[in-house]
Amino acid sequence: MARELEGQVAIVTGAGRGIGKGIALRFAAAGAAVAVTSRNKAQLDQVVGEIEAAGARGLAVAGDATKREDVARVARAAAEKLGGVTLLVNNAGLAGPYGPIGIVDPDEWWAAQEVHIRAPLLFMSAVLPGMIERRAGRIINISSPRCHMLTAHLSAYSLGKTAQNRLAELVANEVKEYGVKTFALDPGSIMTEMADETMTSADAQRWVPKMVERLHELKGKQGPQDGMAWCTDRCMSLAIGRYDALSGRYIDRTDDPDEMLKQPSAKPARVNP
């Protein structure tokens, strides 16, 4: 495999399993040094073992992505042991809580926003000064199809992912003069451990039964690696700069980035001075 990311240093959040792990391994295979983080140190150590077995440099730093001191520690460790961070993938996510507003616990609902909004904000805040100083860097927020679906009883997850898309767009506008690029990438439905947890959740079965049914159907047709290749391929194409002109945009499985390059956004944001 071509080592297209040789010399790059990446941080991938939520990287102990699922999509985050897949992205981390793909970046490492392409030559990047990769710092992986989540709250599960055992899972992270296993990922780093796979990274190192492939001949790349890896670093496991456990921490809570919603806590400022933990994020600062992860970013500092990555910079000190691997080098200046040039790539950030905000992948950490939380499927629940499930239920309608008025019944769902507001504290659990807000905790989900901390994972989906505060965590990317903290990691962006930690790495952007260095990226701006070097006038280079790319950030990918992992989104979800639910950001544009009106799924009843899934407001915490849906709103969190929608906000991640907007955050990528707003930050792209702020850092464009420094050569830093940000994206929101929708990987589609991949049967990860989080999908399994959703299917076995009593709350999910009660409040989003059609979604659970759909997941069961998908599980019967595809394994955890089906769809992963597309996701990691697209992350690679963004990481190497192939689609830098799409900075700030939301990209999903139905989009052809090459065609997107030929056309402006259907509804461009109005930029106020």
Image (spheres, helix red, strand yellow):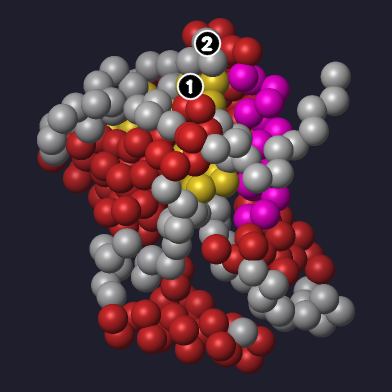
Whether residue 125 appears in magenta in the rendering, the answer is no
* Type of amino acid under label 1: Gly
Give the secondary structure at mark 1. Answer: strand
Q: Is residue 2 above or below residue 217?
A: above
Residue 260 in the image, given as x and y percentages of width and height: 49, 41
Determine the residue positioned at 27% across, 72% down: 223
Q: Which residue is mark 1?
A: 137
Crowdedness near tag 2: few (<14), some (14–19) or many (≥20) residues, C-alpha within 10 Å: some
Q: Is residue 25 found left or right of 247 in the rendered image? A: left
Start-end of magenta stretch = 161-176
Determine the residue positioned at 13% across, 40% down: 53
> Which image quadrant for residue 152?
bottom right
* Type of amino acid under label 2: Arg
Residue 198 in the image, given as x and y percentages of width and height: 50, 77
Residue 4 in the image, given as x and y percentages of width and height: 24, 26
Residue 64 in the image, given as x and y percentages of width and height: 56, 46
**The N terminus lies in quadrant:** top left
Q: Is residue 43 above or below residue 212?
A: above
Give the secondary structure at mark 2. Answer: loop
Q: Is residue 223 above or below residue 232?
A: below
| Any part of residue 172 in sight | yes
Q: Which residue is mark 2?
A: 135
Find the residue positioned furthest to the front: 262
> Which image quadrant for residue 187?
bottom left
Determine the residue positioned at 26% across, 50% down: 46
Q: Is residue 80 found left or right of 54 in the rendered image? A: right
Q: Tally the numbered discs.
A: 2
Whether residue 163 appears in magenta in the rendering, the answer is yes
> Which image quadrant for residue 243?
top left
Q: Is residue 39 above or below residue 112?
A: above
Q: Main secondary structure of the magenta part?
A: helix
Crowdedness near tag 1: few (<14), some (14–19) or many (≥20) residues, C-alpha within 10 Å: many
